[in-house]
Image: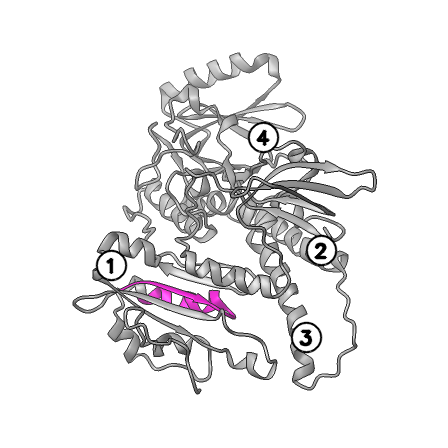
């Protein structure tokens, strides 16, 4: 590994090409670009297997200047702060329920954003530190440098100050993930709006917030195979609890008023009429763009999907260039989920170290959306099952149930729903399982193992439930959609 000023760039590259490549010796067995879930898992596993490993991680501040430490999206601006803030919201609901259960509560309960944010941010910082310690313990070299590829064995690292470091490696793994997009065609969107890169690091409450979730007609969201029916239940629940949804609308512009408020103008796609309202914050949730532009992939001939900008990979995470691999959100056709990136990264490390030939299985990956009413699913949606097996080839069992904890609290449970999609013939193999309700992630995680083992509807019926739980209702489901009977569960 050599450090050099900008002027000696060509000399350094030339030197590395001649001395390293011809002798077959490299600085490292593996260099990973990207210190997120996939990159860290791959690097640590490779080091455990005796490989000499370096990780490059560099966070470009968001458009609003938000920056964070080692660990990637999940740790800093994704799963971890999201789940903690979701828990804060659940506790707010629990406070309301508590009165019905006999707890003497003050009439007005106030939430302090700053207290929550500081606690969440402190936890995230502890995780940043933990990752650095783990890399050190496992003898992985951590470099806070922005990495790009010069060839299939050479990585160029650039520090914040512009200082360059050249590293050579037998293999290179790209795990740079993605960053939130701004709808740049909308005037004022980038100037006045924020994204998920910023929301978790705000020092004060965003207040009344306009959230725009636009997906272009050609884009496909691979995070989960969402059923429109399930999505409808979640939004119905949120509407009942005060979230205002403006359907069939497209934002047109964002203006900052003299009062400091943000005025959003949008148009109704059916009537063409324009509407406007004022907000404290505007949050764009319009998808993520892969971090491929600054990696130097064009010169190497690494194949990208022209529509998505993601890297085309094989079942073994290999790109179109030998010795260059890509994993996690940067890879085309992969679910954008932390656990899949971690598992794929570990398996890749084993293959690169010559310890295994096992490939990642991306089928039946369970996931949960931490909306106020949680939604968890594993396997196929009803629509996808129908496409693959035909309407007559599937059987859908379903039930509307009432969580016991909702009864005394007198909470509406009309959106708590279970759907089990099975093959209609033979053993009635389970193709997909969908659940809205409390602790959806915990429920679906348990059932997902069954799908990995090829569970059937008869297996489900043979399973004894834990009474009285929400998950129990899954093993009791017996009414089919085809029958047209009322699927509402009665009694206990």
Question: For mark 2, what is the residue?
Answer: 117
Disc 3 vs disc 2: which is toward the camera? 3
Mark carried by residue 205: none
Disc 1 vs disc 2: which is toward the camera? 1
- Is residue 440 highlighted in magenta? yes
Residue 288 in picture, x, y percent from top left: 52, 40
Residue 361 in picture, x, y percent from top left: 32, 51
In the rendered structure, the answer to whether residue 236 lies left or right of residue 244 reads left
The figure's colour scheme reads: one colour
Which of 110/29 is in front? 110
Question: For mark 4, what is the residue?
Answer: 185
The magenta span reads: 430-450
Judge whether residue 460 can be spotted in this image: yes
Disc 1 from disc 3: Cα separation: 43 Å
Confirm or deny contact between disc 1 and disc 4 (CB under 8 A).
no
Residue 231 in picture, x, y percent from top left: 47, 58
Question: For mark 3, what is the residue?
Answer: 96
Counting other residues with Cα less than 10 Å from the Cα at mark 4, is it few (<14), some (14-19), or many (20 or more)?
few
């Amino acid at each position: 590994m050599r450090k050099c000023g900008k002027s000696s760039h060509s000399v350094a590259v030339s030197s590395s090409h001649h001395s390293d490549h011809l002798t077959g010796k490299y600085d490292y067995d593996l260099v990973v670009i990207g210190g997120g879930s996939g990159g860290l898992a791959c690097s640590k596993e490779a080091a455990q297997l005796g490989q000499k490993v370096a990780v490059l991680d560099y966070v470009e501040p968001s458009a609003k200047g938000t920056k964070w430490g080692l660990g990637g999206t999940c740790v800093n601006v994704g799963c971890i702060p999201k789940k903690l803030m979701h828990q804060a919201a659940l506790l707010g609901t629990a406070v309301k329920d508590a009165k019905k259960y006999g707890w003497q509560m003050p009439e007005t309960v106030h939430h302090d954003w700053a207290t929550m944010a500081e606690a969440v941010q402190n936890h995230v910082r502890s995780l940043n530190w933990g990752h650095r310690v783990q890399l050190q313990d496992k003898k992985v070299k951590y470099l806070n440098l922005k990495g790009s590829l010069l060839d299939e064995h050479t990585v160029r690292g650039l520090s914040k100050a512009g200082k360059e470091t050249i590293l050579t490696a037998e293999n290179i793994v790209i795990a740079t993930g993605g960053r939130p997009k701004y709808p740049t065609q909308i005037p004022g969107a980038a100037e006045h709006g924020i994204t998920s890169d910023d929301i978790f690091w705000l020092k004060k409450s965003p207040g009344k917030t306009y959230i725009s979730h636009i997906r272009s007609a050609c884009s496909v969201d691979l995070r989960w195979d969402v059923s429109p029916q399930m999505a409808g239940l979640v939004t119905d629940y949120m509407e009942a609890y005060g979230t205002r949804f403006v359907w069939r609308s497209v934002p047109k512009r964002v203006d900052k008023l003299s009062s400091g408020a943000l005025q959003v103008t949008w148009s109704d796609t059916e009537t063409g009429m324009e509407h406007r309202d004022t907000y404290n914050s505007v949050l764009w949730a319009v998808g993520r763009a892969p971090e491929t532009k600054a990696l130097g992939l064009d010169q190497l001939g690494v194949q990208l999907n022209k529509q998505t900008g993601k890297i085309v990979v094989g079942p073994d995470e290999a790109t179109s260039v030998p010795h260059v691999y890509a994993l996690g959100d940067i890879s085309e056709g992969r679910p954008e989920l932390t656990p899949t990136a971690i598992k794929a990264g570990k398996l890749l490390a084993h293959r690169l170290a010559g310890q295994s030939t096992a490939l990642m299985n991306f089928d039946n990956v369970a996931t949960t959306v931490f909306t106020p009413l949680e939604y968890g699913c594993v396997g196929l949606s009803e629509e996808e099952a129908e496409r693959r097996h035909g309407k007559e080839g599937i059987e859908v069992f379903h039930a509307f149930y009432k969580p016991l904890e909702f009864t005394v609290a007198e909470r509406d449970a009309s959106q708590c729903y279970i759907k089990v999609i099975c093959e209609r013939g033979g053993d009635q193999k389970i193709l997909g399982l969908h659940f809205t309700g409390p602790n959806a992630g915990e429920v679906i995680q348990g059932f997902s193992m069954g799908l990995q083992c090829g569970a059937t509807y008869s297996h489900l019926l043979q399973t004894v439930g834990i009474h009285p739980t929400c998950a129990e209702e899954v093993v009791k489901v017996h009414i089919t959609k085809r029958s047209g009977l009322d699927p509402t569960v009665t009694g206990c």
